Image (tube, helix red, strand yellow):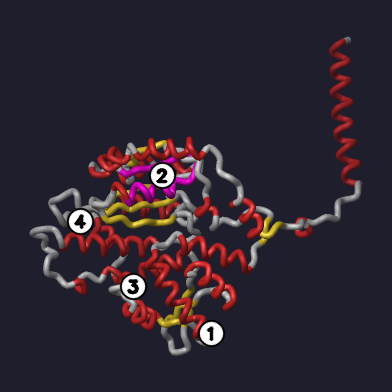
Amino acid sequence: MDDYDVEEDEFEFSRNYFLAKESGKSGKKSARKLSEIDLVDEQDLRAELSNIEPKHEKEAALLINSYKSLYNEWVFELRYGFGLLLYGFGSKKTLLEDFASTALTEYSVIVVNGYLQAINLKQVAMAMAEVLWEQLKLQPGSAFVGLHKNQQPFNSRSMDDLIAFLDGPHASENECFICLVIHNIDGPGLRDSDTQHLLARIAACSHVRVVASIDHVNAPLLWDKKMVHVQFNWCWHHVPTFAPYKIEGVFHPLILTHGGASQSVKTATIVLQSLTPNAQSVFKVLAEHQLAHPDEEGMPIDVLFTSCRERFLVSSLVTLNSHLTEFKDHELVKTRRHSDGQDCLHIPLSKEALEKLVQEIYQ
């Protein structure tokens, strides 16, 4: 009798289920659309987020100080050929920058912001080769002493040639290496398989040491066994900071928000504030030229170089190109083809927005 009751209950449940599905088909559908949702302005939402008071500041500061006591250990690992991989909840950008500025002062450091949407690894490799070239010329007894820079045109070399140069047995001293600091090596601009394999090849070079951070839970899936243990040769360090992703979050649109002209200015302001004072000054020269010549298609690169050199902002075209690459990666500057065929630089902001940006940054 009990079995019969159970079967009857199951039959009633199944019957009610299909009756509900059938009645649902004939019911009236909602006429509401996703486009009708009243979205919050992204600028207003980010302003509200910035007003949130941080909590547990004392505990967070003690946590960061405990990591600083590990700096000597991290440098030791780098000197012996390991790469550093920092993981854990919270932004590690400030921690990495502090480590680079205080513990890596004896070495050349190149920083890559992996949280950007697009990154040109060829430009990164060229910059590393330029720095290594300068280091090798200072090595006593080096074969590069006395050679003119024009004999090593890195901008015309292939990626394989650049990696071969970074991996070459140029010096007897193992201390001659470049530290490549990568914020968010699992970021959107570096996440594809080809880019990760290229980074692994660079990390395996004898004159390169990589210090990187990850934040995505599936980041380790980007690498195979060879990349982890041989090429990157990671030393994993769990360093949760619980710090907000203020800079990294700027480049990712917030859900259920819409942007505007004010948001473009705000984003550009935050990006410029994260750059070096010298890079900000170069951007100011370009901005002032665009405001003074609104009818022109842009500022020619050679004109910008001459103007910056007269103001002692850059000493070579290589230095200027490194700044321009950073501007383009952050989408602060775009390249236009002038009517006479030469490339010109243009800031993709309206006159009013650009004036507001210059006022906020350089007041």
Task: Say which of marks 1 and 4 sits in front.
Answer: 1
Q: Which residue lies furthest to the bottom in this view?
A: 340
Say few, some or many: other residues with alpha carbon within 10 Å of mark 4 (under 14 / 14 to 19 / 20 or more): few
Residue 5 position, x and y percent, is 88, 15
Q: Residue 294 carries which label?
A: 1
Q: Is residue 322 above or below residue 299?
A: above
Task: Say which of marks 3 and 4 sits in front.
Answer: 3
Task: Say which of marks 2 and 1 sits in front.
Answer: 1
Residue with the mark numbered 3: 313
Work out whether residue 144 or residue 3 is closer to the camera in this orientation and state it: 144
Q: Do the residues labelled 2 and 4 touch (CB within 8 Å)?
A: no
Residue 4 position, x and y percent, is 88, 14
Say few, some or many: other residues with alpha carbon within 10 Å of mark 3 (under 14 / 14 to 19 / 20 or more): some
Amino acid type at circle 2 is Trp
Amino acid type at circle 4 is Gly
Inter-mark Cα distance, 2 to 1: 48 Å
Q: Are marks 3 and 2 in contact (CB under 8 Å)?
A: no
Residue with the mark numbered 4: 168
The quarter of the picture where residue 34 lies is bottom right
Mark 3 or mark 4, earlier in chain: 4
Work out whether residue 39 or residue 19 is closer to the camera in this orientation and state it: 39
Say few, some or many: other residues with alpha carbon within 10 Å of mark 2 (under 14 / 14 to 19 / 20 or more): some
Inter-mark Cα distance, 3 to 4: 33 Å
Q: In this view, does 292 lie above or below 179?
A: below
Residue 158 position, x and y percent, is 31, 66
Mark 3 or mark 2, earlier in chain: 2
Residue with the mark numbered 2: 223
Q: Who's the residue at 46% across and 40% down the image?
A: 241
Q: What's the magenta region?
A: 83-101
Q: Residue 154 carries which label?
A: none
